[in-house]
């Protein structure tokens, strides 16, 4: 059906072609939202197999990409600039203040272009034990932390995360070593890739992932971003990772972890995880209301105080793939589909961020490509963007509580009340309820907070 004949998605889903230094097609790169920009880091070049440690930034107002040059190290010493981390893919990147905190991933011991290197398969294991691509190199797991300062656009030492910058004695804390016993950091995490991460206050929570044998890492770790060290390492007896799960913080200070697997006959699991240091795990799968289809590489975003939005790749029994969107009420645990018409039935769309400034979901992809083909190769595209207006769907992520007037004795509210009273006197109000209703309506006109539209006249 043509867009003008009933496809209402044209009203809340818009498409844009990106400009500038658009990242190439990548495998296992991360995309992170921070202050109006989407940052893409790392990944493996699809055609050459070479790993990257490049950083790209996309301005979400203009959809212009820019490759950030971090080679100039002539900065002020207090910025504590360091070399860029080693190239990697299937790592995590989490926003904290003005920083991007990168953890883990998979690296390669040798150059991916080396012709004499034996071929080894590297992929995220799916439920059919299929591997999806090849690289020419031996694999290595990473378990390090790297910090990128978006204000100065440089990689910095971990001690930069501490807003105080020094301990009580005025000496810089030795945060790079962390808490050590006999030279070994007691809470250091297992190296891994394709794991989950989220932010809880000033603590980075890392869960699950996979090892070199494609086995799930059943471990939960907490990194204190202000102390600059790992403070918790505990067992996590669940098989979760990037391919089948997502984790997202909710307003109560806890997190929700959702996982779906056994896609031939989908199984779903939902867990509540309390805030550190307890990190108590509670399964609430039996409380779920609604049954979303099995989605590969699901991503979860909090879009208002009580709602999570999940996006992921849906593969039908006929082999057709499309992007699917679902919302989860974090209180009632009810799933509901987001109806997008035919907008995502064609093209290849996968990674996403939520822009709270405009209350939009921003999806990266390419309308000319086939999602089934790209999914099999784990290909990620950044040439185009589709923006879903969450306000049109009834969701509003307020950054802070609105400031309401405490008194109507003065100011525009008093003026509105006086004008309303005068109008009613001239017209002759019939009863008290009519007077009160008219007065309240007139007063609300002075507060855009309560409006969802503006009327602009040509004569002002």
Image (cartoon, rainbow, N blue to C red):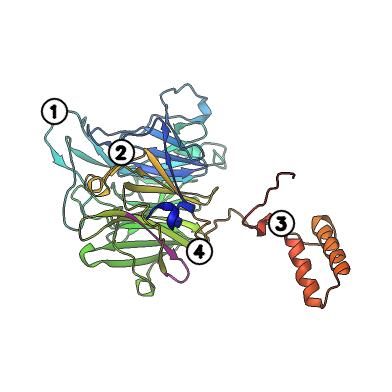
Q: Quadrant of the C terminus?
A: top right
Give how far across and how far down residue 160 sits, in percent: 50, 37
Instruction: Return the residue at label 3.
Output: 447
Could you tell me which secondary element the residue under label 3 belongs to? loop
- Residue bearing mark 2: 43
Return the mark for residue 115.
Answer: 1
Is 37 drawn above or below residue 317 in the view shown? above
Q: Secondary structure at mark 1?
A: loop
Circle nearer the N terminus (1, 4): 1
- Structural crowding at the residue carrying mark 4, measured as other residues with C-alpha within 10 Å and reported as few (<14), some (14–19) or many (≥20): some
Q: CA distance from mark 1 to mark 2?
A: 20 Å
The residue that label 4 is drawn on is: 306
Question: 352 or 338: nearer the eye?
Answer: 338
Indicate the position of residue 429 as horizontal and vertical percent values.
Answer: 83, 73
Residue 29 versus residue 429 in the image, above or below: above
Instruction: For label 2, count other residues whose C-alpha is less than 10 Å away and answer few (under 14), some (14-19) or many (20+).
Output: many
Compare marks 3 and 4 and give the one earlier in the sequence: 4
Label 2 vs label 3, nearer the camera: 3
Q: How far across and how far down the image is residue 69, in percent?
A: 42, 26
Can see residue 176? no
The reply to whether residue 172 is in sight is yes
Query: Which of 405/147 is in front?
Result: 405
User: CA–CA distance between discs 3 and 4?
Assistant: 25 Å
Q: Upstream in the sequence, badge 2 or badge 3?
A: 2
Residue pictured at 33% horizontal, 49% vertical: 189
| Viewer-nearest of discs 3 and 4 | 3
| Range drawn in magenta | 323-334
């Amino acid at each position: 059906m043509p867009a003008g004949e009933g496809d209402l998605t044209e009203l809340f889903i818009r498409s844009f072609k990106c400009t500038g230094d658009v990242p190439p097609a990548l495998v296992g790169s991360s995309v992170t939202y921070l202050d109006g920009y989407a940052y893409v880091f790392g990944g493996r070049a699809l055609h050459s197999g070479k790993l990257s440690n490049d950083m790209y930034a996309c301005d979400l107002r203009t959809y212009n990409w820019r490759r950030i040059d971090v080679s100039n190290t002539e900065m002020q010493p207090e910025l504590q600039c360091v070399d860029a981390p080693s190239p990697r893919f299937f790592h995590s990147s989490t926003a904290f203040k003005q920083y991007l905190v990168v953890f883990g991933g998979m690296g390669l011991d040798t150059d991916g272009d080396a012709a004499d290197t034996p071929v080894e398969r590297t992929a995220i294991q799916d439920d059919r034990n299929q591997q999806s691509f090849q690289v020419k190199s031996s694999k290595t797991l990473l378990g390090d932390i790297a910090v990128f300062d978006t204000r100065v656009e440089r990689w910095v030492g971990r001690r930069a995360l501490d807003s105080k910058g020094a301990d009580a004695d005025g000496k810089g804390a030795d945060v790079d070593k962390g808490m050590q016993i006999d030279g070994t950091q007691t809470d250091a995490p297992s190296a891994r890739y394709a794991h989950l991460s989220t932010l809880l206050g000033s603590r980075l929570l890392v869960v699950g992932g996979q090892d070199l044998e494609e086995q799930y890492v059943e471990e939960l770790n907490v990194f204190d971003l202000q102390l600059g060290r790992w403070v918790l390492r505990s067992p996590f007896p669940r098989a979760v990772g990037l391919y089948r799960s997502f984790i997202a913080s909710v307003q109560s200070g806890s997190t929700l972890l959702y996982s779906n697997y056994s896609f031939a006959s989908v199984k779903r699991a939902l867990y509540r995880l309390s805030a550190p240091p307890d990190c108590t795990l509670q399964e609430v799968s039996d409380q779920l209301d609604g049954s979303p289809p099995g989605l590969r590489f699901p991503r979860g975003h909090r879009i208002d105080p009580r709602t999570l939005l999940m996006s992921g790749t849906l593969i039908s029994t006929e082999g057709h793939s499309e992007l699917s969107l679902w919302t989860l009420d974090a209180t009632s645990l009810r799933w509901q589909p987001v109806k997008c018409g035919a907008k995502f039935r064609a093209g290849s769309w996968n990674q996403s961020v939520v822009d709270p400034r405009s209350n939009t979901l921003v999806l990266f992809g390419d309308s000319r490509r086939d999602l089934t083909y790209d999914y099999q190769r784990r290909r990620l595209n950044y040439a185009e963007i589709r923006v879903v207006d969450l306000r049109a769907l009834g969701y509003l992520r307020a950054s802070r509580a609105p400031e309401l007037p405490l008194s109507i004795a003065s100011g525009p509210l008093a003026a509105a009340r006086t004008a309303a009273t005068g109008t009613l006197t001239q017209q002759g109000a019939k009863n008290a309820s009519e007077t009160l209703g008219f007065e309240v309506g007139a007063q609300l006109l002075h507060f855009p907070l309560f409006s969802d539209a503006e009327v602009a006249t040509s004569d002002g």
